Amino acid sequence: MPVKKNVILFSLFFLTLFSLIYINKRKENRKDYHFVITKINENAKGGITVSDSTTEFDFANFNSYKIDVQKEDSLVKKAFSKKVYIYRKDPKANKYRLSLLLNESGTFPSDWQ
């Protein structure tokens, strides 16, 4: 009986964990993002979260490990898009130019969401 109880608890733990990850990724996938990055936070694994004063983007569906993002870059992601565009301001032309394009790499494809 204890083995069966442990298997059930173990299964519930991982089901809960995957459900929370899926909900976070789904929420991020369904929103539009368009803001200039004012803050960059790096976690212990090397992934980053970027934000401005009101919006935060944590790359839940995208690989942010060791990407070249700087303050004053502009992040654009349309709802249900499989791509994130990061634009960097060219100081000479005073215009934003595409600096980085990230494709979806998440555990749960956006087609599921």
Image (cartoon, rainbow, N blue to C red):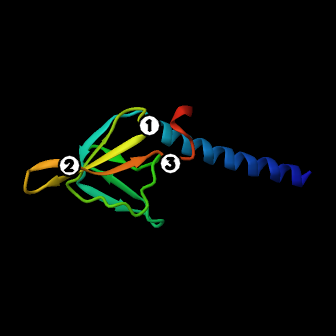
At a point 62% along the width and 45% down the height, the residue shown is 18
Q: Please indicate whether residue 8 sits to the left or right of residue 82 in the image.
A: right
At a point 57% along the width and 46% down the height, the residue shown is 107
Residue hosting label 1? 29
The amino acid at mark 3 is Ser
Q: Quadrant of residue 67?
A: bottom left
Q: CA distance from mark 3 to mark 1?
A: 12 Å
Q: Within 10 Å of the Cα at label 3, are there few (<14), some (14-19), or many (20+) other Cα atoms? A: some
Residue contact at pointers 2 and 3, CB within 8 angstroms:
no
Q: Nearer the viewer, mark 2 or mark 1?
A: 2
Viewer-proximal residue, 94 or 23?
94
Residue hosting label 3? 105
Q: Position of residue 24 (x, y in %)?
A: 49, 42
Q: Which dot marks residue 97?
A: 2
Kindly state the secondary structure of the residue where label 3 is placed: loop
Q: Nearer the viewer, mark 2 or mark 3?
A: 2
Does residue 52 sit above or below 81 in this rendering?
A: below
Q: Position of residue 20 (x, y in %)?
A: 56, 43
At a point 75% along the width and 47% down the height, the residue shown is 11
